[in-house]
Image (spheres, coloured by chain):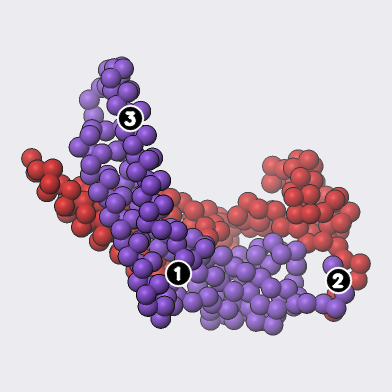
Chain colours: A red, B purple
Amino acid sequence: MPSLGHELLTAFWQTIVIYLFLIVALRLVGRAIMAERTLPEYLIVALLGSAVELALYAGSSRLVTGLASAATLLVLNRIFTMLATRSSRLRRVLVGTPIILAHDGQVVPGNLRRAGFTQRDLLTAIRERGYASIDDVRFAILEANGTVGVVPRQKDAGS
Amino acid sequence: MMPSPAPSPALLAAIVVRTTLVLLVLVVGIRVSGKRRIGELNMYDLVLVLLIANAVQNAMTKSNEHLAVSLVCAGTLLLIGWLFAKMIARWPGLEPRLLGTPTIIVQDGQMVQQHMKHEGVTEEELMTAVRGMGLDDLSNVELAVMELDGFISVVPKSHDEAE
């Protein structure tokens, strides 16, 4: 049974190792993951913390397994990104694709149902973006990250 | 794991005390370690928050001994965060090296494919950010930049007519 002093020292230096490892690894993987735009990114960030939890304080064998687990998650993120860039079918499975909810002031009922949106949800989202009614909307799109993007109708099409 | 009997009032009281202690130590620790110079949550803050949350997870419900271990973890993390902030304040030249620099991914309506690939941004994610600004076409985008916190800033092309 290690003494408390020894345990605290272990916690101290293993915490430093994990911190530095994650910083360097995230730099290599790219900072896009921090914005958690896709479901895999969101899950991977959430799992990273749990993956290294015991590695923070529970002895050197835990340190190694924690680092292995964190590295695996970050490599998987890179692979998911690569697959999603290359294949639209895989993108649909892994991160989902945008769904057009309204177009030129008209609701697209089939898509609304598919997205699990009611008319009221849609109107709320439109108002939250600062538009009064569906008449002002050129496009309302449920994005893969769950937000609703609204492109307004313009009086003139712009330059 | 052993089957747990109903928790005694003393145990519940200890949990209340430890939870309060953990929260107080974190609030004071984060305040003392200093508000970071950089406003947005950068990679260093993200890792800090992620690790602190997990470090103290068991402190609230397990033994007093575990409380000490968790507090050492949290304290170490706050200390490193403070050190990095000090270092950057002292030697500003370190900042781009430690934090990286923003990356241009669209310039004058044109995607910079190489940068997009490097940052792992798909065209669909880019268009999501563009639509988030109320635009539906890259030709209306002056500039899109991936910031240090991973978010994509979109600057529309300015038109003469007002909104």
> Do the dots labelled 2 and 3 sit on one chain?
yes
Asked if the residue under mark 3 is in contact with the one under mark 2, i.e. CB atoms within 8 Å, the reply is: no
Residue bearing mark 2: B162
Q: Which quadrant of the structure image shows residue A157? A: bottom right
Q: Decide which of B34, A135 is in the foreground and name it.
A: B34
The correct choice, above or below, for A71 with respect to B140 in the image is: above
Q: Which quadrant of the structure image shows residue B138? A: bottom right
Q: Quadrant of the N terminus of chain B?
A: top left
Residue in the picture at 70% in, 78% down: B142
Characterize the local packing of mark 3: few (<14), some (14-19) or many (20 or more) Cα atoms within 10 angstroms. few
Residue in the picture at 38% in, 66% down: B85
The correct choice, above or below, for A82 with respect to A123 in the image is: below
Residue bearing mark 1: A30
Residue in the picture at 56% in, 71% down: B146
Percent x, y of residue A115: 69, 46
Apparent side of residue B15 relative to residue B40 in the rendered image (left or right): left
Give the amino acid type for the residue marked by disc 3 in the picture: Val
Give the amino acid type for the residue marked by disc 2 in the picture: Ala
The chain carrying label 3 is: B
Residue B17: mark = 3
Q: Earlier in the sequence, mark 2 or mark 3?
A: 3
The chain carrying label 1 is: A
Percent x, y of residue B64: 22, 34
Percent x, y of residue A126: 78, 51
Q: Secondary structure at mark 3?
A: helix
Apparent side of residue A100 relative to residue A94 in the rendered image (left or right): right
- The span from disc 1 to disc 3 (Cα, nearest Å) is 41 Å
- The span from disc 2 to disc 3 (Cα, nearest Å) is 58 Å
Q: Secondary structure at mark 1?
A: loop
